[in-house]
Amino acid sequence: MANGWFERQVGRLLKQSAEGDTISTEETDARSILTMLEGLGLAMIETGQATNDVEETLRLVAKVYQLGDVRTVVLPTYVMLQSTTAGGEVRVESARQGGGRLDQTGAVETLIGRALRREVSPAAAVAEVARIRTAKPRFGPVVSLLGHVILTVGFGMVIYPTLQAIWVYAVLGAGVGALVLLARRFTGLSSTVPVIAAFGVTLATTLLLVHVAGDEPLRIIAPPLVSFLPGLTLTIAAIELTNNQVIAGASRLVFGVAQLLLLTFGVFAATTLVGHLPTAAPQPLLGPWSGLVGVALVAVGFTLFMSAPRGALVWIFLSLALTYGAQALGAFSLGAGLSGFVGAVVVAPFTRFASHFRTSPPASVMSLACFWLLVPGALGFIGLSGVAQGGAAGLHTLATAGISVLSIALGAIVGISLSRDAGRLARLARRGVSRR
């Protein structure tokens, strides 16, 4: 009796697999399956998944739908599929640039889960992918702008928490957020917006705001530019390179470095116009509580700016808090350069565990937010800007950023391996219990 009550309570907390009928083999054909795989691959690329994960997922889905001879080539900008069962057909499709929103990321992962359980027909999956790719965001431009302001203040509280700098972060975050929203409406401006934003933020900081916020202006400039910092891109590039995805990893790495160079050019242009980057007397930092407040603000800002799925805020905050705590522990025990390894190790096990609860979003929604918090791109931007000014400290920061990117990638790989091993052991344990 007690066991039955306990099982019912656990069932209410955990997500249950859908009980719909699986799709029979007669309802599918090789070409429709190949079309479905093409759509799923494009959606995964556009939501920021590593190419090795995309290839592995497509092979698993093809196996579930009994398309065993499919060949896949996945790069950051396109996916190519071939199947002799489909008459030797080769399908090549380009992906759109830019990462997807968090609600799109969650919807794609949910759809892939249904496909891996063969609960959706290829035609229905293709239609769902088209709906996800064209879906409107949960929040309008005003709420998205507010989210960018909160996100900027949150990252500022994590990087350089002073009382005087908070309103500076808010003002600069509003200006950069308006540029981001403008670039979304006029895509032709997207390539120039990072330079314009970095130039404007640097100019405003050096001429008006540095003496208010105090310390080096680069610490103030980095948080407002968080939506342009390619920390996630560089991390995924390192993950791909360590998984022998040389072409994908190298091309993504070049793209990430190019983004940093665009930002650096904007800083350099503003510095050249002003003459130098002035420094001011450092302001007293807020207490240790400021980091946790910053993490909470980052969670809220992410939810609004990146249009997270409904009910995701609490879980995003928990995953960010755990990542931040692990990174702080790593900084204390191993140093700042390797702290990202400890932070990244806990991401995959926690997000996969949390994704089993009924109220939680898919694991990819939480993990993407966590990798943004690790912000190796901020360190790289500060380092490149310092090098552009001829400072030796910039070279040290740039080297630290490179080590941080690699350590985060290695930590992510270790965390994914641990979560997969734990899942395999759990399945074996359930089988042993069921046999008894």
Image: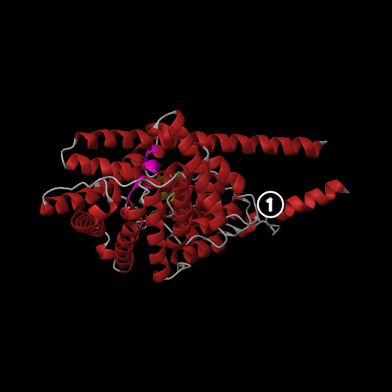
Q: Is residue 384 left or right of residue 365?
A: left
Graded by Cα atoms within 10 Å as few (under 14), some (14 to 19) or many (20 or more), the crowding at tag 1 reads some
For disc 1, the marked residue is: 14
Q: Residue at x 67, y 53 (%)?
A: 15
Magenta residues? 229-238
Can you see residue 95?
Answer: no
- Percent x, y for residue 5? 83, 51
For the residue marked with disc 1, what is the amino acid? Leu
Q: Seen in the image, is 395 located left or right of residue 293? A: left
Q: Position of residue 429 (x, y in %)?
A: 72, 35
Nearer the observer, 4 or 125: 4
Residue 232 magenta-drawn?
A: yes
**Residue 415 in view, yes or no:** yes
**214 relative to 143 in the view: left or right:** left
Majority secondary structure of magenta residues: helix
Nearer to me, 253 or 90:
253
